[in-house]
């Protein structure tokens, strides 16, 4: 046997699984960092603006600290995003070779958004001493706009995979491509809004977590209070909005991806007045151990307690997504969403009536947990969306299995990437923690602390 | 000219910009690697950090942009290259992770050990990434990549062959050359006594690039007959001559201490090689038979993308101009943070 014959072999089912795992891993990693890329500039700019308006040193030094963290997060965001754009081809040439042109427009626009982001990030981070405060503040605004626009674009590409539109398929060849029609498909609205709000929740709650923990450790000064209050308020305001948008997303799924809905709810047989399932696992074609809320699903999905909901069994078994993954992750997202809504409501009450409770240990503990909860909801939401679409990569048109690269050795690639991502996670967390501790925060910060605090 | 040709032009312009600016950033990593011990090399490293810190992310986006334009405009070419070049592109992707993360992490590290680890990561990845990209280009040019519709090429020999090795090594050298040339002016502005060693590096790298380019031509002659024949047609031939002249002019300008002018000629020397290659291949995207027209996306896609590019350019051009101007002008002393962060004792203990 030739020593190099390995490279001439075909991919195995293990390689296919590896490709999916690799995609999920790198997307799941990127999306957390990207969320910070979307929302952190806004929160930081707000801080900087308050600093100039009030002259308060705490605002200024918090803004500088956050800007420093942004420098690190954007760097790892950029590299993890680059991997993704490579992987689109490395792992899914069958998707990109045919449909690359259909979703090219949003990605091109996204490219420009990244450009604007990267340029102004450079100016913002390194221009702190070189620009007047006002110009400096304005130089941050394009970052924020580009972050939101970029998210919209990239999510619209994903939405197209759920609602493929804007082209005709004739004998396996695509014709009549309409890039705008593809970009603005039916899933674009709910998905992109849901994602942008999620980015603000993740960022706000995670940033606030850091200061909540600080306060729990006894550092209850103005600096920590502000560091907690501003991001937490942003996220808390978004929490109820997100539940509403999630409802919109669920209606969209009910109308246009009934099989995904059935998997989310573990509903096998078509039913009128279908119940809502809480918990439970699917075993042998039925959902067991779930708490049922009669007519709940029909009511929520179609605003009609007797509406008919399609079951999974209406499609052949090889077209059903893995029910347990989708059901569990959907439940996790919704559960986390309502838990955060609860904490946000308590926060509202504190704001309105009992300011003193802000430093209550139980409240701070709950608030600190909102950071991880938001990340969990984000990951669970994407797992629902992507896994619920299986076995299709382009819904109803192209199977994931037919899109994968046929090269052997994808598994090796996965192992290498796994190692690299582990190391990158450790290093990122380590560096961020060091940045947070970098200089002892003085009990009463001085203007000189601001002037000598290094950015980036 | 068709819309597909126009898009191809934009795409290749992005590739050129990435090669020049992104390439110089990689080259900076090369010199970081060979800057000497932690103490002796400290000032060179600081100069490098200062020069690429604000701009590397923007320079990096040229790559993303080129990749995206490729899959938008010529999907089967993108898929074909990605499927066949799985190994070197994964390598390049890993190199990009190491480079970006290593650089960002080092900047915020305070202890010498950490700076060494992250610095080594940054510098090593700066070396391998251009090699892989160069090797991919060599594989395409030597007709080893079929389009997606025609199956997959050989996973190993597509990029591990005489042409690819020659172009890969050439890419690394060219990056080093560009970086040294660009850094001469930065050194003059900020650390004048680093100018002579930097100029020496630029001259050596320039000479090396010249020799390797010649070796590359021989490799192409022996290994890639299809391309060799087309390289000496009028347009590509003229571009190669331009490159040689610009390279010679750069040497003269370096010797004369004209560090701004040499940036232009050095850039031209590199760009002319790239465009010479493109001109030799045109209208074939994947030699020997995949043409622009044969793989172009639908006209509606081309039009939409070109409009997007036009609108984007209106925003981008002034922004980029501001970015580069801001950081070319400013003296080093203003970035007090750079020197601070390396001398500050290990942070940590909170009182
Ligand atoms: C902080 C994050 C977060 C929170 C609190 C929620 N979601 Fe969510 N959800 C996401 C973050 C997210 C997401 C990660 O951003 C997803 C993945 C794809 C998408 O468009 O948004 C998502 C997807 C997603 C989908 C699938 C959409 C599709 O496949 O097209 C549905 C039906 C919901 N969500 C519904 C909800 C409901 C009813 C919530 C009420 C509590 C909720 N989400 C809270
Ligand atoms: C524009 C945005 C996106 C695109 C183009 C995209 C594309 C893809 C592709 C091609 C696959 C492989 C096929 C499959 O197994 O479904 C995939 C899978 C996956 N993606 Fe997405 N994705 C996007 C956004 C995201 C994001 C932001 C996440 C965040 C976590 C995500 C999570 C996943 C997961 C978990 C899988 C694996 C699904 C499975 O194993 O069944 N995706 N995606
Ligand atoms: C819903 C999913 C996604 C969101 C919300 C998102 C958002 C972002 C944001 C805000 C950034 C810039 C900030 C930062 O660097 O931290 C970024 C970077 C990047 N993303 Fe994503 N992204 C998503 C999925 C994807 C996918 C699927 C791809 C590729 C196919 C991708 C490719 C990139 C690239 C290439 C960059 C680097 C840009 C640069 O160099 O600055 N992203 N993403």
Image (tube, rainbow, N blue to C red):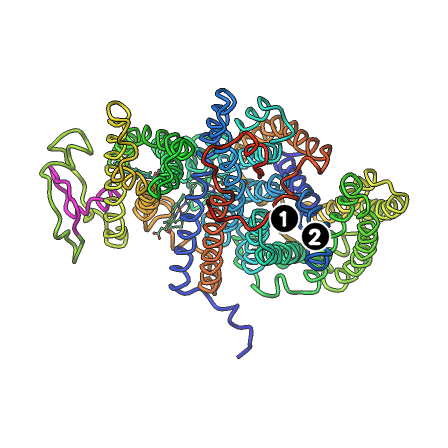
Residue beneath the point at 14% across and 53% down: A286
- Which element carries disc 2, helix, strand or loop? helix
Find out if the beta carbon at label 2 lies less than 8 Å from the nearest ligand 3 atom.
no
Q: Left or right: B11 with respect to A390?
A: right
Q: Left or right: B239 with respect to A112?
A: right
- Which element carries disc 1, helix, strand or loop? helix
Compare marks 2 and 1 and give the one earlier in the sequence: 2
Front residue of this view, candidates B103 and B317: B103
Front residue of this view, candidates A61 and A280: A61
| Tag 1 subunit | B
On the image, the x and y values in percent for residue A236 come to 32, 31
Q: Is residue B288 visible?
A: no
On the image, the x and y values in percent for residue A95 come to 45, 48
Q: Is residue A253 above or below residue A414?
A: above
Q: Which residue is mark 2?
A: B42
Q: Quadrant of residue A300?
A: top left
Q: Are marks 2 and 1 in contact (CB under 8 Å)?
A: yes
Q: Left or right: B10 with respect to A437?
A: right
On the image, the x and y values in percent for residue B218 come to 79, 61
Q: Are discs 2 and 1 both within one chain?
A: yes
Q: Which residue is mark 1?
A: B342
Image quadrant where one finds the N terminus of chain B: top right
**Number of the label disc, if any, that sits on residue B113:** none
Q: What range is drawn magenta here?
A: A259-280
- Number of residues whose C-alpha sits closer than 10 Å to that of mark 2, classed few (under 14), some (14–19) or many (20 or more): some
| Tag 2 subunit | B
Residue beneath the point at 27% across and 54% down: A318
Residue beneath the point at 15% across and 44% down: A277
């Amino acid at each position: 046997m030739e020593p190099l014959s390995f490279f001439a072999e075909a991919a195995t089912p293990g390689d296919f699984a590896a490709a999916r795992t690799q995609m999920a891993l790198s997307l799941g990693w990127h999306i957390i960092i990207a969320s910070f890329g979307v929302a952190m500039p806004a929160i930081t700019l707000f801080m900087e603006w308050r600093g100039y308006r009030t002259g308060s040193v705490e605002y200024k030094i918090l803004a500088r600290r956050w800007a420093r963290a942004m420098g690190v997060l954007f760097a790892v965001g950029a590299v993890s995003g680059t991997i993704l754009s490579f992987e689109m081809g490395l792992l899914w040439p069958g998707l990109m070779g045919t449909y690359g042109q259909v979703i090219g427009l949003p990605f091109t626009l996204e490219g420009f958004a990244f450009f604007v982001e990267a340029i102004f990030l450079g100016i913002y981070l390194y221009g702190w001493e070189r620009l007047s405060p006002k110009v400096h503040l304005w130089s941050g605004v394009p970052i924020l706009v580009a972050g939101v626009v970029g998210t919209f674009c990239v999510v619209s590409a994903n939405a197209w995979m759920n609602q493929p539109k804007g082209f005709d398929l004739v004998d396996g060849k695509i014709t009549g491509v309409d890039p705008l029609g593809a970009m603005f498909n039916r899933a674009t609205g709910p998905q992109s809004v849901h994602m942008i709000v999620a980015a603000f929740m993740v960022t706000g709650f995670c940033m606030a977590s850091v200061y909540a923990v600080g306060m729990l450790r006894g550092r209850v000064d103005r600096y920590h209070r502000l560091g907690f209050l501003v991001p937490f308020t942003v996220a808390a305001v978004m929490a109820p909005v997100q539940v509403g948008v999630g409802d919109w997303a669920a209606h969209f799924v009910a109308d246009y991806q009934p099989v995904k809905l059935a998997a989310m709810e573990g509903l096998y047989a078509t039913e009128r007045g279908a119940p809502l399932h809480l918990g439970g696992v699917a075993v042998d074609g039925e959902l067991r151990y779930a708490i049922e809320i009669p007519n709940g699903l029909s009511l929520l999905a179609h605003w009609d307690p007797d509406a008919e909901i399609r079951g999974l069994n209406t499609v052949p078994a090889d077209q059903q997504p893995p029910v347990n993954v989708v059901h569990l992750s959907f439940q996790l997202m919704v559960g986390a969403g309502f838990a955060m809504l609860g904490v946000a409501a308590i926060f509202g009450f504190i704001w309105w009536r009992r300011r003193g409770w802000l430093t209550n240990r139980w409240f701070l503990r709950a608030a600190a947990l909102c950071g991880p909860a938001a990340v969990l909801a984000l990951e669970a939401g994407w797992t629902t969306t992507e896994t619920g679409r299986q076995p299709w990569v382009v819904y109803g048109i192209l199977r994931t299995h037919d899109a994968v690269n046929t090269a052997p050795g994808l598994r090796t690639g996965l192992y290498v990437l796994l190692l690299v991502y582990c190391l990158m996670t450790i290093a990122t967390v380590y560096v961020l923690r060091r940045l947070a501790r970098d200089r002892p925060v003085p009990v009463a910060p001085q203007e000189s602390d601001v002037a000598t605090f290094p950015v980036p | 000219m068709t819309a597909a040709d126009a898009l191809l032009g934009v795409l290749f312009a992005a590739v050129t910009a990435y090669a020049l600016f992104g390439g110089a950033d990689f080259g900076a990593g090369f010199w970081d690697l060979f800057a000497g011990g932690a103490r002796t090399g400290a000032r060179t490293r600081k100069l490098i950090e200062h020069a690429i810190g604000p701009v590397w992310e923007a320079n990096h986006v040229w790559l993303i942009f080129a990749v995206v334009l490729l899959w938008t405009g010529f999907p089967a070419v993108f898929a074909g290259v990605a499927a066949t070049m799985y190994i070197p592109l994964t390598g390049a992707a890993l190199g990009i992770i190491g480079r970006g993360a290593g650089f960002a992490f080092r900047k915020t590290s305070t202890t010498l050990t950490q700076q060494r680890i992250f610095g080594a990561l940054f510098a090593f990845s700066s070396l391998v990434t251009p090699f892989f990209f160069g090797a991919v280009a060599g594989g395409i040019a030597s007709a080893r990549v079929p389009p997606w519709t025609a199956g997959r090429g050989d996973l190993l020999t597509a990029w591990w062959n005489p042409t690819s090795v020659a172009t890969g090594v050439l890419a690394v050298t060219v990056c080093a050359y560009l970086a040294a040339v660009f850094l001469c002016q930065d050194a003059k502005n900020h650390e004048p006594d680093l100018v002579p060693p930097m100029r020496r590096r630029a001259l050596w790298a320039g000479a090396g690039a010249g020799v390797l380019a010649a070796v590359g031509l021989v490799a192409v002659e022996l290994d890639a007959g299809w391309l060799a024949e087309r390289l000496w047609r009028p347009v590509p031939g003229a571009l190669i001559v331009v490159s040689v002249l610009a390279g010679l002019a750069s040497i003269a300008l370096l010797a004369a201490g004209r560090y701004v002018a040499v940036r232009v000629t050095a850039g031209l020397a590199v760009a002319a090689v790239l465009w010479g290659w493109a001109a030799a291949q045109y209208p074939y995207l994947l030699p020997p038979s995949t043409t622009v027209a044969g793989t172009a996306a639908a006209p509606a896609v081309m039009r939409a993308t070109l409009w997007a590019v036009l609108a984007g350019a209106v925003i981008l051009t002034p922004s980029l101009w501001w970015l580069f101007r801001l950081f070319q002008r400013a003296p080093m002393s203003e970035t007090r943070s750079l020197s601070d962060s390396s001398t500050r004792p290990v942070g940590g203990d909170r009182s």
